[in-house]
Image (spheres, grey):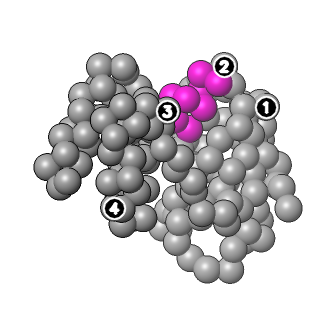
Amino acid sequence: MPFSFTAVIYKNGINLCVDVPLHITNAITGKKGFIKIRGTLRKHFFQQTLVPVANAPYRLFVNGIMLKGAAVGEGDRVRFTIEPDEAPPEYPIPAALLLQLKRHKLLQAFESLTPSRQKEINRYIGALKTGTVIEKNISKVITSLKMKT
């Protein structure tokens, strides 16, 4: 069930964030700790984690991707819609990695890695931003797989 609230984005240290109303976090979970959520900020979809704060409401950090996607910034009063994200995250093989695995005939070697290792590689490479950094890290994966075959 989605919950909506309006909050002002403020700076905490070097990070931008908002406080999530207590009635929402109390309704989302009965346990304490971090809460995985998905939601929208001005129609921009995001997945994030609510962070508990001692004697204060849960905090939702608003990262650069969210700010840019929603065209908002510090001091803006914005509307959030959030709900628990209970689905485990998916990390498909990034297209550039898949291409290189096929080119070097190492797809089977990659698939023989443990599922958690595959997931970690996919997650890491999928999160990289620049082409040169992506290529460099894919090269490391290819070299490592070649050494194992």
What's the magenta region? 62-69
Q: Of the residues under marks 3 and 4, which one precedes in the sequence?
A: 3
Q: Nearer the viewer, mark 1 or mark 3?
A: 3
Query: Would residue 97 be visible to someone looking at this image?
Result: no
Residue, disc 1: 43
Q: Residues within 10 Å of mark 3 (few under 14, many from 20)?
A: few
Query: Residue drawn 39% across and 47% down?
Result: 107
Q: Amino acid at mark 2?
A: Ala
**Labels 1 & 2 near each other (Cβ < 8 A):** no
Q: CA distance from mark 4 to mark 2?
A: 41 Å
Residue, disc 4: 113
Q: Of the residues under marks 2 and 3, which one precedes in the sequence?
A: 2
Q: Is residue 98 left or right of residue 43?
A: left
Query: Residue drawn 38% across and 53% down?
Result: 108
Vertical relation: 67 (above or below) 89: above
Q: Of the residues under marks 1 and 3, which one precedes in the sequence?
A: 1
Disc number for residue 71:
2
Q: Amino acid at mark 4?
A: Leu
Q: Residue furthest bottom?
A: 30
Residue, disc 3: 95
Q: Residues within 10 Å of mark 2 (few under 14, many from 20)?
A: few
Q: Of the residues under marks 4 and 1, which one precedes in the sequence?
A: 1
**Labels 1 & 3 near each other (Cβ < 8 A):** no
